[in-house]
Structures are given as C-alpha cells and as structure tokens.
Image (spheres, rainbow, N blue to C red):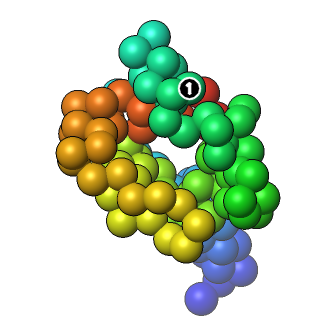
Amino acid sequence: MGGGKLLRRALASLALAVLLAGCTDTRPAGPPPVATPRGAELFKERCAPCHPDGSNVINPKKTLHGGVLADNGVTTPAGIVKKMRNPGPGMPRFDQSAISDADARLIAGYILATYR
C-alpha cells in the first residue's frame, strides 16, 4: 500500500473518530424539557426542602445538577420520575398517591430545564 493511500485512510479514520466523539446514548430524545410555573411550584413544595437550588442537604454529592444526574444515569424526565418513585437511601418515596404522574413529569421537566 502506497504512503498516500495509507495517509488518506489514517485521515479518514481520524475524521470519523472526531465525528463520533460527540455521540452518546445518554442524550434525551425529543424536545428539551420545559420549566413551567406549575413545575416550579411543585418543586418548591415537594422537593426544595431537601434540594434547595438543586443541591442535596442529605447527600451533597447527589445534586440535581445536570452533570451529576447524568453521572447517575438520570438524563430524562422519565428517569427523574423513576427516582421519585423508587429512590435510593435518604430520599422519601413519592408514589402516585403522593404525587400524580402528571405532576411528577412537571417536576422532572422543571429540574432538567433549571439545573442542566
């Protein structure tokens, strides 16, 4: 194989690697989340006592800020609702009788839109 052909293949491989570097499977699909006034109100009532300004008074390493959420596998509204329904240690469980699915989605949208 000639030097020019080898160089072209190497450059093509490098270009492909650069293009793929930004691709991940953790990006949420669909429209970006929206922080509605009702979502903000529900967050303030139900979540802000333990998560003021997106922090975490129980476990300071597990905030609601985007990078931390993503590091813990939570990148979508459905992921936040799942955590609300089946949280880890230290967080109360919010089942459907405590927070409806519709309200839980509003809270999730608020969190993702506000603390990315």
User: How many residues crowd mark 1 within 10 Å: few (<14), some (14–19), many (20+)?
Assistant: some
Compared to residue 52, the image places residue 80 above or below, namely: below
Location of residue 102 in the rendering, given as x and y in whole percent from the top left corner: 23, 31
Q: Name the quadrant containing residue 48.
A: top right
Quadrant assignment for the C terminus: top right
Location of residue 55 in the rendering, given as x and y in whole percent from the top left corner: 73, 45
Q: Residue 34 versus residue 55: which sits nearer the camera?
A: 55
Location of residue 14 in the rendering, given as x and y in whole percent from the top left corner: 66, 66
In this rendering, does residue 38 appear at all? yes
Quadrant assignment for the N terminus: bottom right
Q: Residue furthest bottom?
A: 1
Location of residue 45 in the rendering, given as x and y in whole percent from the top left corner: 51, 28
Counting every numbered tag in the picture gives: 1
Q: Residue at x 42, y 32 (%)?
A: 107
Please name the amino acid that badge 1 sits on: Lys
Q: Residue at x 47, y 51 (%)?
A: 75
Q: Give the residue number, with chain letter if any, for mark 1.
A: 44
Question: Left of 23 or right of it: where is 17?
Answer: right
Compared to residue 3, the image places residue 115 above or below, namely: above
Secondary structure, mark 1, is helix
Q: Residue 44 versus residue 53: which sits nearer the camera?
A: 44
Q: Residue furthest top?
A: 37
Q: Residue furthest right?
A: 60
Q: Residue at x 66, y 73 (%)?
A: 10
In this rendering, does residue 65 appear at all? no
Compared to residue 47, the image places residue 68 above or below, namely: below
Question: Left of 6 or right of it: where is 86?
Answer: left
Q: Name the quadrant containing residue 82.
A: bottom left
